[in-house]
Every structure is written in structure tokens, then in C-alpha cells.
Image (cartoon, coloured by chain):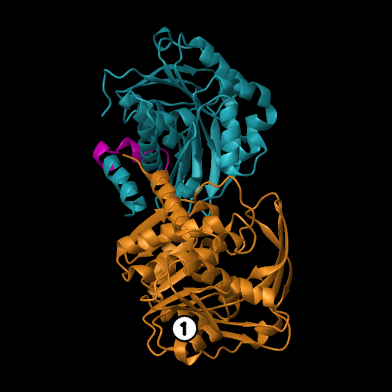
Chain colours: A orange, B cyan
């Protein structure tokens, strides 16, 4: 479990109230958002300091659900207005989803001010938000030493120059396959990963959903297939859960050796697979470390050959 | 290398004359077809007995290119008319192709009569042809003991009942992900694989192109990611090369133990990756067994984590 001697990871991202339908049911006004999923996953490994914003409709039940002995919420600001809210539907093909609504609410006025106690943290996960905000968070930290970045198509298309500024200051970028292609204009995935490395980060992780993940660490490549899951209830947050497991495992290990990064991909994939088993982060909140270790063993067995 | 003490694999499928364009160039009227690719790959491991048909335009240069000390071509019939011919183009996105023409030619009159010397063979690869022809080949063998089947969407849509008859008599089916979903009506891939197993074959291999392959062996699952390739010249025949490496490795091993099947997927994937490096089966014809072993080692390294 998380250990007080491990220094916290700062995560800056969204907290959302989601309404999600899938063939397995419907979840109304449940917790969502990149920072929420990341914290739920990474707190299995280390303490987490959250930087985010919510609105006045963020009720006591939501605060209670976010609360966790390892998660510091003092950097979550409450602003007048509504919490960022997203609604989506997964149909029979669980790999595709339709967005029904996106209401930015207070997210439009997100202007993070980091609590004093966060500023000395050296590891930060910049979840998918406006690159200008990501830069502000980065500038608020005294000495960021391990900067992990996520982004998405919207920022690639609308603010690529500022995004590239953040990328240049990152040690790791976690990105999905389509985004990697879009960011670089390179269709070939290993080629795209190399181009991203040339922008700055020596480590690039590409998430491929059900097809697993690729890790480029300098010139070394690691690939992990997806765990074949017969039941996927709700894939929302799988990417941020992956990031939480990945960064959390590295932080707990206290090393960025290639072998640690490889195993971190397996832990990230394992946490993401649990995330998909229920709506919101429900499954992560009751997840035991032993279950997680067993699932990583399933990955080991899955890819093993003489 | 192939060994005279290993009994031959019978392969029944097409020999084609292909014209292929890709961002890397153009190859006009080169050898193609499922039986050709399978034989080029599997002859790295075992002797091969080919059952196929060509037309009168199949010239000495084509015969010469097909010839190999381990490949018996006495089951290749020449009929009046033209050899099956396919033309296609791969554009910037090498994972998609457009068919420019398909001329069935003598393939429309393909009615395989197996040479006497083939009939005692126990291992057979039924490449993608009309299920009625696949059944005829199967019935021509005295005691088929290891039947490996490939098929494609066309037969799933046009003759599913006869196809299911062949599936029921198969030990292994090799199929791509879309076909597995189409055959079963099940979008979830592990679910689709289970449904295919219920039709008969205890072993199901699903090819996912650049995303690798999945193997279901009874209740056991193995997954191998694709090797991240920076250069793909021509993916034509990759699937049949995979099958050739997979079945060839198993035949040479003389065992169908789970560990052998897992390693066979790696050999199939390695052969397929070489196939993509040049047009036609050009790369396979100069491939050394040591190169193949080294590429399988690359797969081992690719998926290894502590």
C-alpha cells in the first residue's frame, strides 16, 4: 500500500460529474474527470496531491467519494457555477462512444493556485487540460524532476505551439495512438513515437486501448498486449487510470530504470483493466493490492513463451 | 532447416500473379496467392506439398520462383486460361489497401485432385478458398490428423453453413479479428474466440495485423503484440506467411503442447514481419533460419518485464 515515506505526486486535471450509459447499465451524475481517475489509481501506490476545480453542485457525497487517506484535496478549488460535466453512451461496440453533452462549467475559469505544501513535490502528472494551465502548474513547482504529460486531439489542433512547449519540458508523454499520429503527421506508430521523442521527452507511452500499450524508452521498445476482457462495463477513465498505475508504480519504485518502466506499463494496464469493470472509479475504490499483483501476473502469463 | 524426416504439410490454396503498388514502389506480375506465401514461409521448417491451379500464362520464370527443394509442386494443375490475378494499392496508411482488380481466371474451375503421394499426409493447411474445395481436399486425405483452416469474409457471408462444416472438422482456425467477429456476431474478441471453439476447433488464432495475434488453446490465452516496424513495404501475404511459420514450426516440433503453440505464434509473427519487408515473397526466399531465430528473440525482448 501507499507509504508515508514516498513523496506525493501532484496531479493537475479535471474532476467531473459524468452520466454514462453502456450495455451494462447507466450511471447518473457519478464522479469522473482525469484527476479523479488518476488519483483513484495512483493512490494505490503513493500519496497524491490533487489540483483541480469543482462547482457549487459538487455535493458532500462527491467529496466523500473523492476522499482517501492518501489523497490531499486541498488544491481542489470550489468556484461559483457548475462542475464540469460529461455525458456519453457506449453501445454494443464498447470501443466506440458517443458524447451526449459536455458542459465545461467552472472548468472555463480554472486558474490553478497550488497550495504551498504542493510546491516542493518533484513528480507531477499534467492530465489533459489546456496547455496554458499545464504550463502554469509546472511553473508553480519549485523543482519538478519527473514531469508526465497527457494531452488530447483538441489541444493538438488548437494550441499545438503551446502544447509543444509543455512537451519539451516533459520527461514522459502518455498519449493514445491516434493522437501520436496526429501530433506528428506520421502514420507509422514507431516513427511517430520517435518524432515525439525528438520534441523532448525521452520516454513515450502510447495507449492502444484493447490492443495494449507501447513504451519507447530512448531507443528501447516494450510492448504489452491488452488483457483479453470478456466484460467491459465502462471504459471511461481507463487512460487516466493507466497513467495513475504507471506513474504511481514508478514513484513507489523510486527508480526510472528500463525494467521499472516496463513493469509500470503492466501495472498501468492492470489498473485500467479493473477500471473498466464498473462505472466511475467504483472498482478502483475497493481494489486490493493483492488483486492488482495477481492481474499483473496474468499479463506475465499472457505473453510468456519459451 | 527443413528435414527429410519431417512429413510434409499439404497446403491447398491459390497461386496468383499480383500487381502491387505501395509507397515503396511497384511490383508488376509477381508471384502471389495464399498457397504460394504459405509454402514460402513453411518451407523454412518442413517439406510442403502444394495443391493449386495456374493458367497457361504461368511462365517458366514463375515456376522457377516457386521451386524449392522442400516444395513439391506436383499437385499444381495447369488449366487453359489465365492464372488468378490480383491488383492492389497500399497508400500512405499501409494498413489499408484498395483492390484495383481481381480476375479469377482458372481459379473458377479449381477442382483439386491430389497426387497419390500426398494422400497419406496428416497435416493440412486449408488456405482461403471455397469451403466446398476445402472439403474436397479434406476428403482426399486418408487420415488427416492436424487440420488448420483459414477463411475470409466472403465465405462467411456466402456459404456459412458449408464453412461451418469445414470448421467442425478443423483442429485450428486462423482468422483475422474482423472475420472472427463477423463469423460469430460477437463484437468482443475473446467472446468471439470462445464461440468459434464451440464450433469445433480447440485452437483459435486471431490475427490483428500490426496489433499482433491472440491464441486460444482450450481455456488458455496467449497474446503477442506486433513487432513495431518502421518500414512496411508490402503487407500482401503477411497472413498466409504467418500461417506458414505457425504450422511449419508446429510440424517441425512434432508436438502441439501449449508451449509449442505459443512459440509457433512468435515464429508465425516473425515470418510475417519479414514478408512485409519486400514485395511478393522476395524476402522469404532469401531468409536465413538464423535471422528468423534472432527476430523471435526480438519478440522475447519486446514483451519481457520483471
Location of residue A217 in the rendering, given as x and y in whole percent from the top left corner: 34, 65
Q: What residue is drawn where x is 56% and y is 41%? A: B190
For disc 1, the chain is A
Residue B161 vs A15, above or below: the answer is above
Location of residue A147 in the rendering, given as x and y in whole percent from the top left corner: 42, 78
Residue closer to the observer: B91 or A47: A47
Q: What residue is drawn where x is 42% and y is 30%? A: B38
Q: Is residue B287 magenta?
A: yes
Residue closer to the observer: A16 or A163: A16
Residue closer to the observer: A84 or A96: A84
Classify the position of the C terminus of chain B by image quarter: bottom left
Residue A269 visible (yes or no)? yes
Instruction: Give residue B110's quadrant in the image.
Output: top right
Secondary structure state at the residue bearing disc 1: helix
Q: Is residue A271 left or right of residue A249?
A: right
Classify the position of the N terminus of chain B by image quarter: top left
Tally the numbered discs: 1
Residue tagged by mark 1? Answer: A165
Q: Is residue A113 magenta?
A: no
Location of residue A266 in the rendering, given as x and y in whole percent from the top left corner: 42, 57
Q: What residue is drawn where x is 65% and y is 40%? A: B186
Location of residue B107 in the rendering, given as x and y in whole percent from the top left corner: 57, 24
Crowding at mark 1 (Cα within 10 Å: few <14, some 14-19, many 20+) = some
Instruction: Give residue B76's quadrant in the image.
Output: top left
Instruction: Give residue B120's quadrant in the image.
Output: top left
Residue B107 vs A7, above or below: the answer is above
Residue closer to the observer: B247 or A48: A48
Magenta-colored span: B279-291
Q: Is residue B188 left or right of residue B246?
A: right
Residue B226 visible (yes or no)? no
Amino acid at each position: 500500500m501507499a507509504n508515508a515515506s514516498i513523496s506525493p505526486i501532484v496531479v493537475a486535471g479535471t474532476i467531473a460529474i459524468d452520466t454514462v450509459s453502456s450495455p451494462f447499465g447507466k450511471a447518473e451524475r457519478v464522479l469522473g474527470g482525469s484527476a479523479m481517475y488518476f488519483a483513484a489509481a495512483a493512490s494505490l501506490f503513493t500519496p497524491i496531491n490533487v489540483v483541480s476545480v469543482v462547482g457549487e453542485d459538487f455535493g458532500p457525497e462527491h467529496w466523500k467519494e473523492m476522499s482517501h487517506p492518501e489523497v490531499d484535496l486541498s488544491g481542489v478549488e470550489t468556484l461559483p457555477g457548475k462542475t464540469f460535466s460529461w455525458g456519453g453512451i457506449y453501445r454494443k461496440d464498447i470501443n466506440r462512444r458517443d458524447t451526449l453533452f459536455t458542459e465545461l462549467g467552472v472548468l472555463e475559469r480554472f486558474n490553478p493556485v497550488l497550495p504551498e505544501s504542493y510546491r516542493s513535490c518533484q513528480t507531477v502528472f499534467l492530465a489533459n487540460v489546456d496547455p496554458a494551465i499545464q504550463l502554469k502548474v509546472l511553473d508553480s513547482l519549485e523543482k519538478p524532476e519527473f514531469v508526465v504529460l497527457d494531452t488530447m486531439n483538441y489541444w493538438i489542433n488548437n494550441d499545438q505551439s503551446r502544447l509543444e512547449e509543455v512537451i519539451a519540458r516533459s520527461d514522459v508523454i502518455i498519449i493514445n495512438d491516434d493522437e501520436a499520429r496526429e501530433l506528428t503527421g506520421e502514420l507509422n506508430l514507431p516513427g511517430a513515437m520517435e518524432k515525439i521523442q525528438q520534441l523532448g521527452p525521452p520516454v513515450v507511452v502510447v495507449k492502444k486501448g484493447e490492443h495494449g500499450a507501447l513504451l519507447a524508452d530512448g531507443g528501447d521498445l516494450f510492448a504489452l498486449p491488452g488483457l483479453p476482457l470478456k466484460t467491459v462495463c465502462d471504459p471511461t477513465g481507463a487512460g487516466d487510470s493507466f497513467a495513475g498505475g504507471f506513474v504511481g508504480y514508478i514513484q513507489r519504485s523510486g527508480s526510472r530504470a528500463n525494467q521499472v518502466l516496463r513493469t509500470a506499463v503492466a501495472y498501468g494496464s492492470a489498473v485500467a483493466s479493473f477500471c473498466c469493470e464498473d462505472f466511475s472509479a467504483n472498482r478502483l475504490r475497493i481494489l486490493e493490492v493483492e488483486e492488482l499483483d495477481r492481474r499483473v501476473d496474468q499479463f506475465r502469463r499472457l505473453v510468456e513463451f519459451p
